[in-house]
Amino acid sequence: MKQICVIFRQSPLGNSSSREGLDFALLSASFEQQVSVVFTDEAVLHLLADQQPELVGSKDYLSTFKALNIYDIETVLVCEQSAKQFGITEDKFNFEALLADSNAIKQLLAQSHEVVVY
């Protein structure tokens, strides 16, 4: 089984990169690939609840991140440093994810056959 790591780095608003990354992750998982997800940089903003992307003309795909575990995507990591930079703590996460330090993320990347960045 191929291990794929999808890294989200972009803000949830202003571009379609994250929506495309989410589609890729779910599609890959549906074809029985082992998919893991990492949120870093501005992408940690995906984790916040009660966002209203339609107010700025975007479609609301953010609630779809709650479906990661339905697709057996069990490894969802959040860069601890990025979360700290944006003042986001685990109790503010809108879906299940774990804070991880850079060593844990590096280890996950080393175990992956493919790494895709969105």
Image (tube, rainbow, N blue to C red):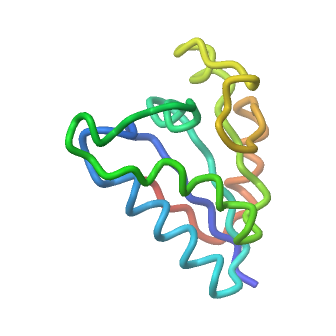
Instruction: Name the residue at 73% across, 68% down.
Output: 70
Instruction: Establish if 10 lies above or below 50.
Output: below
Instruction: Establish if 66 lies above or below 70.
Output: above
Residue 51 spot, x, y in % from top left: 45, 33
Quadrant in the picture for the N terminus: bottom right
Q: Is residue 37 left or right of residue 22?
A: right
Instruction: Name the residue at 74% across, 42% down.
Output: 97
Q: Quadrant of residue 29?
A: bottom right
Residue 47 spot, x, y in % from top left: 58, 35
Q: Is residue 37 left or right of residue 97?
A: left
Instruction: Establish if 110 lies above or below 13.
Output: below
Q: Residue furthest left?
A: 57
Instruction: Establish if 2 lies above or below 39.
Output: below
Asked whether 40 or 60 is in front, the reply is 60
Asked whether 56 or 112 is in front, the reply is 56
Residue 24 spot, x, y in % from top left: 48, 70
Instruction: Name the residue at 32% across, 38% down.
Output: 13
Instruction: Name the residue at 79% across, 59% down.
Output: 74
Callout count: 0
Residue 27 spot, x, y in % from top left: 54, 78
